[in-house]
Image (cartoon, rainbow, N blue to C red):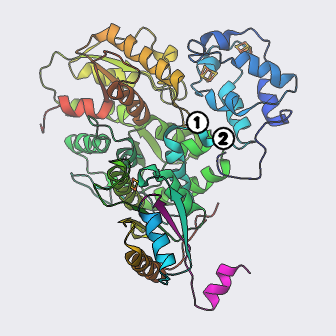
């Protein structure tokens, strides 16, 4: 029995959440949440990327295929991107990915884009808590549902 | 195969299934001399067969570069099905995703459809639909192309919309089937297990719909449903065959359009369907001028199964545009009967990488015919 199964039986589903956080804003925001000792759900796994524009839709699909229950891409607020327009690229890509997930008939709300700046430690924690709750309501992701 | 972590990355001493395909090769080298890749690189199918016969292992590049266009198989005096050999070998190793087009997003989407979604793709088109109809239409992955290819002048959704318009114009209200991707790429990247999952789901939906004809726009869908699904009692029709069959119900505007036609490998060499598209094009009143290499000698569009889109692919695409420009000039049209050819050729046309001056238009058959035909007769 895996940990995931045990969690389910205990009716205490702990979703795995992958956060792609940009180095210059959102990662620093997460850091601030940490040093300020603000509590946020421990099932959040942060992947640091240099810019939210680095996140290719393929990374997101792979995260889901490997068992992530939710994915957040977090970057600097528009206008603040360290590389000027990386976050606008990210916005376009994530929106397209969400549209594609809808075409596939899948719960697109498992994917979200957020702007979190380096000073918004508190907001980082809030977003994570709220998203975790949302994913909990959706339940665990299902992989391998179509049998051969 | 793309996803597993446990399979080796090199095909060791070819297994019996792969060897039996190439055993009769007498090393004449015709395949290499005809291969479109050979004209732009050092790719050498004869050499690959030779080293396999000697028991050497094959690497990723050998297996992912081949376009499986089947031009070599068409000419081989010994009838060696080299594409089948490549497919069979691919199924024995993990392909290295690094060089794949668009970070492999399209193959990932296919895996996603097989593993994660309970339904098929959701479509919405304008036009009249009848869910009781005995003829159903399936546009293919067009709406996914739109999200990840981001071409400015091309909307892939239009492929489905034009087909719907045409079907309505000839007085038929089709059923619109919500299938998953046909699985062509899963099959040709060697992932038989994934393909089977998709096939099983789709077959069940097709059977449930109670149809007798399944109409598709994409040459790959046509080949896959017809050859790999083997759906007894269900006729698979490519859009070109459908229009050809209902020619008499369409009326065309007067036009002076010049057009040439690219035979997609899956429709032409694989399914031996060369004439329907040509009949359809001639009937529109446009003047049809053949490419220098046509029918069974048509040259591949340059990319297959989203495996690689590199300098070689682009060189092949440019040659295609050159060939077409020689036929119809800069104000002509190059019509294709495959969603993928349409994507690749338009991409290089629009992207201008590498720099080029070609200005002709690349159009999908359904879109082309829909534009030229009158609203309603
Ligand atoms: S054309 Fe056929 S027989 Fe000749 S080298 Fe190629 S595979 Fe062998
Ligand atoms: S299938 Fe096409 S690309 Fe592959 S070796 Fe044969 S001719 Fe060349
Ligand atoms: S550096 Fe933060 S989004 Fe580009």
Q: Is residue A97 above or below residue B142?
A: below
Tell me the number on the disc at residue B193: none
Q: Position of residue B134 (x, y in %)?
A: 36, 53
Can residue B246 be seen by looking at this rendering?
no
A2 vs B91: above or below:
below
Residue B97 lies in the magenta stretch? no
Chain part drawn in magenta: A1-24
Does A78 sit above or below residue B346? below
Residue at the far front in the pictured view: A35
Nearer to the camera, A120 or A12: A120
Labelled pair 1, 2 in contact (Cβ < 8 Å): yes
| Mark 2, secondary structure of its residue | loop
Tell me: B41 left or right of B14. Answer: left
> Badge 1: few (under 14), some or many (20 or more) residues near its Cα, within 10 Å?
some
Q: Which mark is residue B96?
A: 2
Q: Label 1, secondary structure: give it.
A: helix
Query: Would you identify the image quadrant in which residue B164 lies?
Result: top left
Residue B263 found in image quarter: top left
Residue in the image at 66% along x and 48% along y: B192
**Closer to the camera, A53 or B176?**
A53
Q: Which residue is mark 1?
A: B99
């Amino acid at each position: 029995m895996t940990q995931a199964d045990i969690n389910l039986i205990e009716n205490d589903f702990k979703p795995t959440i992958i956060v792609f956080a940009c180095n210059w804003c959102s990662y620093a925001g997460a850091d601030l949440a940490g040093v300020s000792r603000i509590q946020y759900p421990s099932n959040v796994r942060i992947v640091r990327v240099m810019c939210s524009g680095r996140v290719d839709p393929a990374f997101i699909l792979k995260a889901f295929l490997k068992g992530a229950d939710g994915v957040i891409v977090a970057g600097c607020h528009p206008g603040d991107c360290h590389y000027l327009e990386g976050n606008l690229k990210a916005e376009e890509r994530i929106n397209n990915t969400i549209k594609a997930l809808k075409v596939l008939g899948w719960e697109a709300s498992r994917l979200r884009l957020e702007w979190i700046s380096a000073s918004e430690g508190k907001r980082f924690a809030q977003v994570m808590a709220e998203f975790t709750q949302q994913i909990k309501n959706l339940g665990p992701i299902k992989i391998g549902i179509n049998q051969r | 195969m793309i996803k597993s972590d446990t399979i080796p990355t090199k095909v060791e001493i070819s297994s019996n299934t792969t060897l039996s395909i190439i055993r009769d090769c007498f090393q004449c080298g015709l395949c290499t001399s005809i291969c479109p890749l050979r004209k732009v690189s050092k790719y050498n199918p004869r050499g690959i067969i030779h080293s396999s016969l000697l028991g050497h292992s094959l690497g990723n590049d050998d297996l992912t570069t081949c376009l499986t266009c089947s031009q070599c198989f068409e000419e081989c005096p010994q009838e060696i099905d080299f594409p089948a050999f490549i497919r069979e070998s691919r199924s024995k190793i993990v392909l290295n995703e690094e060089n794949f087009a668009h970070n492999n997003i399209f193959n990932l989407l296919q895996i996603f459809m097989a593993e994660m979604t309970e339904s098929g793709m959701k479509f919405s088109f304008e036009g009249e639909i009848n869910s009781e109809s005995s003829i159903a239409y399936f546009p293919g992955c067009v709406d996914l192309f739109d999200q990840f290819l981001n071409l400015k002048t091309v909307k892939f959704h239009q492929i489905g919309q034009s087909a719907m318009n045409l079907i309505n114009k000839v007085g038929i209200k089709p059923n619109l089937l919500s299938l998953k991707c046909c699985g062509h790429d899963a099959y040709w990247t060697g992932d038989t297990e994934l393909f089977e999952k998709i096939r099983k789901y789709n077959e069940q939906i097709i059977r449930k719909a109670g149809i007798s004809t399944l109409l598709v726009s994409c040459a790959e869908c046509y080949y896959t449903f017809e050859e790999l699904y083997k759906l007894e009692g269900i006729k698979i029709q490519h859009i070109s065959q459908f229009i050809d069959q209902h020619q008499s119900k369409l009326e065309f505007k007067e036009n002076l359009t010049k057009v040439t036609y690219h035979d997609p490998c899956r429709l032409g060499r694989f399914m031996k369907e060369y004439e329907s598209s040509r009949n359809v094009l001639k009937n529109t009143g446009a003047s049809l001028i053949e490419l220098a290499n046509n029918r069974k000698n048509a040259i591949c569009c340059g990319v297959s199964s989203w495996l690689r889109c590199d300098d070689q692919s682009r060189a092949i695409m440019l040659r295609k545009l050159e060939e077409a420009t020689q036929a119809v000039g800069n104000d002509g049209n190059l019509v294709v009967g495959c969603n993928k050819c349409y994507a690749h050729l338009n991409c290089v046309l629009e992207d201008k990488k590498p720099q080029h001056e070609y200005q002709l238009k690349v159009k999908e058959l359904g879109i082309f015919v829909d534009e030229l035909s009158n609203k309603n007769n």
